[in-house]
Image (cartoon, rainbow, N blue to C red):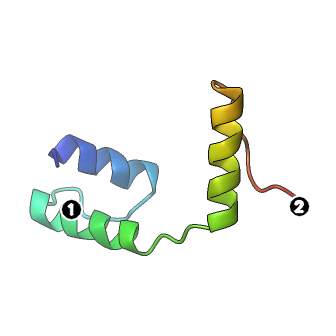
Amino acid sequence: MDISTLRKYARVHKIKSKSKVNKEELAASVSRHFANQSVKELDAITCFLYTVHYKDSVLRLPLHI
């Protein structure tokens, strides 16, 4: 990945790192963060189906089912 993409991911997800970090270290911390993310299968399927059905609309979670 490009270093600017890694920096943006780190900024958006508030991953703490040194200001002067090289690409390999940033890629490792982004990779660790991404691997630790959990996905609720029901929420992902519901959001996908809603988005497919309503095209441009985005479903905001959590739903109170």
N-terminal of the pair, mark 2 or mark 1, is 1
Residue 6 screen position, x and y as percent: 25, 51
Residue shown at the point (28%, 67%) measured from the top left? 31
Q: Which residue is located at x 63 percent, y 68 percent?
A: 40
Residue 33 left/right relative to 3: right
> Can residue 3 be seen?
yes
Which labelled disc corresponds to residue 65?
2
Q: Residue at x 44, y 58 (%)?
A: 14
Q: Position of residue 30 (x, y in %)?
A: 30, 63
Q: Are marks 2 and 1 in contact (CB under 8 Å)?
A: no
Q: Foreground: 24 or 20?
A: 24
Of residues 4 and 64, the one nearer the viewer is: 64
Q: Residue furthest top?
A: 56
Task: Count how many numbered circles sit on residues in the image.
Answer: 2
Work out whether residue 24 or residue 54 is closer to the camera in this orientation and state it.
54
19 is higher (above) or lower (below) than 60:
below
> In the displayed structure, does residue 36 sit left or right of residue 8?
right
Question: Which type of secondary structure does the marked residue at label 1 adopt?
Answer: helix
CA gap, disc 2 and disc 1: 38 Å
- Are there few (<14), some (14-19), or many (20+) residues within 10 Å of tag 2? few
- Work out which residue is located at the far right of the displayed protein and give it: 65
- Name the residue at 89% across, 61% down: 65
Give the amino acid type for the residue marked by disc 2 in the picture.
Answer: Ile
Judged by depth in the image, the label closer to the viewer, 2 or 1, is 2
The quadrant where residue 63 appears: bottom right
Residue 38 picture location, percent across and down: 53, 72
The amino acid type, in three-letter code, at marker 1 is Leu
- Pointer 1 residue: 26
Residue 58 visible in rendering? no
